[in-house]
Image (tube, helix red, strand yellow):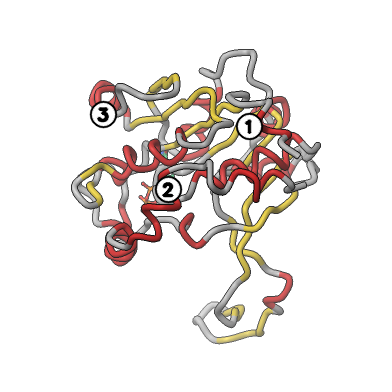
Amino acid sequence: MTAYRDARGDVAILVPAAGLGVRMGGGTPKALRTLCGEPLLVRAIRNVTAAPSVGIVVIAAPPDDVERVRAMVTPSPVRTLVVPGGATRQASVAAALSAVPAEFDLVLVHDAARALAPPALVEAVAARLRAGAEAVVPAMPVADTVKRVGDQDEVVATVDRSVLRAIQTPQGFRRATLAAAHAGAVDDHTDDAGLAEHLGVRVDTVPGDDLAFKITRPFDLVIAEALLASAAITERSRSIDSTEDATTGEG
Ligand code: CTP
Ligand code: MG
């Protein structure tokens, strides 16, 4: 089965990249910080544009850096728009969504901060949407024991982790679903699926990927640089072609 070979380029991917990076230490917006000599955002865009499903990329850039970001991601193998981001991630995603041309019915949202997420993960999410899902998120099992704590940080209970998942991006939506989710937003959510859940939309999961971890703190930058130095990740990021058939059957 090669369902998405026929559908190449039918996905718009929004890349929120306007965050300040406070937990990274501030100064430079996180997406513009370098990873092995290259901005995180450039690495993230290279990975998503290697996914054959992606027909357009819309980046929400730090408002003062729109021109700089445009220059950074040009030339690109895929049509790329850059818009000024907002004060929250949610506002940045909404700004990018409003720039998506009408012909795209499938929209993915992917954090620039998850710069090492492999193209195969983009394909897995897109394939699940094409198979009929309304909303799709990559999910990882939780490795640590999880406890609920009280006002003084004292342990109140141990949570059953077998029913918990850590959620990554890219998250995928039918365009109308994502638009309705953002239009109906009453408070700030840290991801887009959260907004869709609020509307009562069913959100399906696909297996996440270790490489889609979010680069949040200085520690994560060290991990990311170490991963980039290893041959395995270079192979996985280079092209979707070797993994294409493996993900086609997702659904
Ligand atoms: N983001 C955005 N616009 C904002 C805030 C966040 O586009 N106003 C983006 C970030 O650039 C990042 C993604 O949303 O790619 C996930 O956010 P996070 O990891 O929290 O990044 P920052 O907000 O930059 O980091 P921090 O919360 O530590 O300041
Ligand atoms: Mg943030």
Task: Give the mark, 3 or 2, whose residue is nearer the N terminus.
Answer: 3
Few, some or many residues within 10 Å of mark 2 (<14, 14–19, 20+): many
Specify the label residue 13 is tagged with: none
Work out which quarter of the rendered image holds the N terminus and state it: top right
Q: Is residue 219 above or below residue 236?
A: below
Separation of disc 2 and disc 1 at Cα?
A: 31 Å
Point out residue 216 in the picture as x, y percentages from the top left corner: 37, 57
Specify the label residue 182 is tagged with: 1
> Of all residues shown, which one is farthest toward the top?
102
Which three-letter amino acid code belongs to the residue tagged 1? His
Q: Is residue 175 above or below residue 103?
A: below
Task: Judge from the rendering whether residue 160 lies leftward or rightward of residue 90; answer left or right.
Answer: right
Which three-letter amino acid code belongs to the residue tagged 3? Met
Of 60 and 40, which appears nearest the observer? 40
Specify the label residue 237 is tagged with: 2
**Image quarter of residue 83:** top left
